[in-house]
Amino acid sequence: MIQFLLNNRLVTEHALDPNLTVLNYLRGAQQRRGTKEGCASGDCGACTVTLGKVVDGQMHYQAVNSCLTLVSSLQGKQLITVEDLKQGSELHSVQQAMVDCHGSQCGYCTPGFVMSLFTLQKNSDGWNRHQAEQALAGNLCRCTGYRPIMDAAQQACEHACTDAFTANATSLVQRLQALSNDEVQIIEADGSRCYLPKTVAQLADLYQQHPEARLVAGGTDLTLQITQQYQRLPLLIALEQVNELKICHQDQDHIYLGAAASLHQCYQFLAQQIPAFSRMLERFASLQIRNQGTLGGNIGNASPIGDCAPMLLALNAQLVLQQGERQRKVPLDQFFTAYRQTVMQPGEFIHSITIPKVTVSPNFTAWKVAKRLDDDISAVFAAINLHINDEVIVEARIAFGGMAATPKRALAAETALLGQPLNLTSIEKACAALSMDFQPLSDFRASADYRLQVARNLLRRYYAQASGELTITEVSRYVS
């Protein structure tokens, strides 16, 4: 059984198929057709809804792709759809802004835009263009052009009005807190079952009992097996309620990132500690995906084009793996064994990620090369972490994604740089050594020759930036 609020109405579901997405639940069981399916892969944003949850005693809102969100994620939350925004007989201020600024479109994608803007308004203290660009990057249709929608965002954020959600915030917090409990919950129907543990100990025990189960953290990758490959997952263990796995903190020597911390949470936490890492997370898919997707999930799926693994490899990160009550530490560069394969044993899961602060160079840099700026998968991802003392490179950690069957360090290139000054000669030697490190494949994203050339050019770019020959400035995503 799970319980949640559908706007203000308490919903109790005793039997739900764990493979059911929130999108299909809304359109089927709840007959709410304002939320649309455009791609079923988290790319278009037409299915965007807002989830409200209690954080430190306050309501906190996130926009998510309902096509990739399984119903198990609803436990203890408030689900808001476009049908809920109307304020009595009046439009919500966000909806009115879309009307006033002529930002509404054919009606198919507009509800998704409205929900993204609603969430932006809830999380904003005023107009911030960069925040608006980030909030709308996951809503791809632009039938009316960029300017009217950005104008609507500006109007909605500059003139935010008190609405029913704000007025009822205290009551909502109390009602949602009343839905929390410490017991393992189960939802099942149609031959599938999902466990919802609340503690790491419960998770570890369940996973030892059911090592064949699939772990669902954000689900933004795993759910594609349901929506795109039409598979059924018979046994799931959802990590959404295990708050211990979401903790991020630091001490004098290390940075600790919980495996179930969302990518947006990591983006916020790392903004001061490792700014380059944080900035690159802005280009990881869309805000809807980053609100759901987790750091541990991006590592654990062992994708060769995951954006987080190259950065963590260059930062000498270690994983804390847990099986039952036993934990072990594994350097990330020993974690991946082959395409989509790792050293994890049955019943073992990623507990947390540790980054030694001494490894983080002030010049740590990461770059993503993709066909578009936002909401796209890398063709090549580079992370470069060089330590220079007395004008000599004393430590080098360089890692790439999209260049091999796994995220991988460029060991030959690192060796070519060690003990050398950072100049064009040493960089060209490192570029030549990349052909010993990688023999990339050609696919629909890029050819092998292109990938190798881009990897070399990114090393050259690093030198050009470090030497002051190149100044890189941010370019707005939207043209006014």
Image (tube, rainbow, N blue to C red):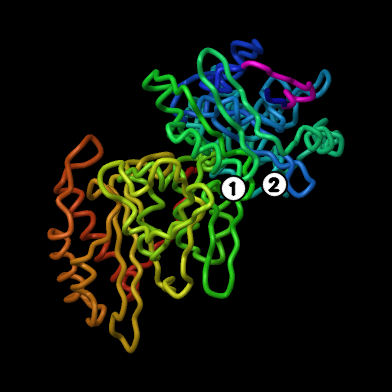
Cα distance in 3D space between marks 1 and 2: 8 Å
- Taking the spot 70% from the left edge, 37% from the top edge, the residue there is 156
- Estimate the x, y position of residue 48 in percent, counting from the top left: 57, 28
Q: Is residue 13 magenta?
A: yes
- Estimate the x, y position of residue 222 in percent, counting from the top left: 44, 32
Left or right of 338, for residue 314: right
Q: Is residue 269 magenta?
A: no
Report the magenta stretch's main SS: strand
Residue 271 visible within the image:
yes
Q: Residues within 10 Å of mark 2 (few under 14, many from 20)?
A: some
- Estimate the x, y position of residue 164 in percent, counting from the top left: 83, 30
Q: Quadrant of residue 178?
A: top right
Placement of 398 over or under 407, stated as above or below: below
- Taking the spot 74% from the left edge, 26% from the top edge, the residue there is 5
Left or right of 7, for residue 205: left
Placement of 136 over or under 234, stated as above or below: below
Placement of 89 over or under 118, stated as above or below: above
- Using the image, tell me which numbered label, if any, was put on residue 124: 2
Left or right of 49, for residue 59: right
- Taking the spot 16% from the left edge, 76% from the top edge, the residue there is 425
Residue stretch rendered in magenta on the structure:
4-15
Placement of 396 over or under 64, stated as above or below: below
- Using the image, tell me which numbered label, if any, was put on residue 131: 1
Q: Are marks 1 and 2 in contact (CB under 8 Å)?
A: yes
- Using the image, tell me which numbered label, if any, was put on residue 102: none
Q: Residues within 10 Å of mark 1 (few under 14, many from 20)?
A: few
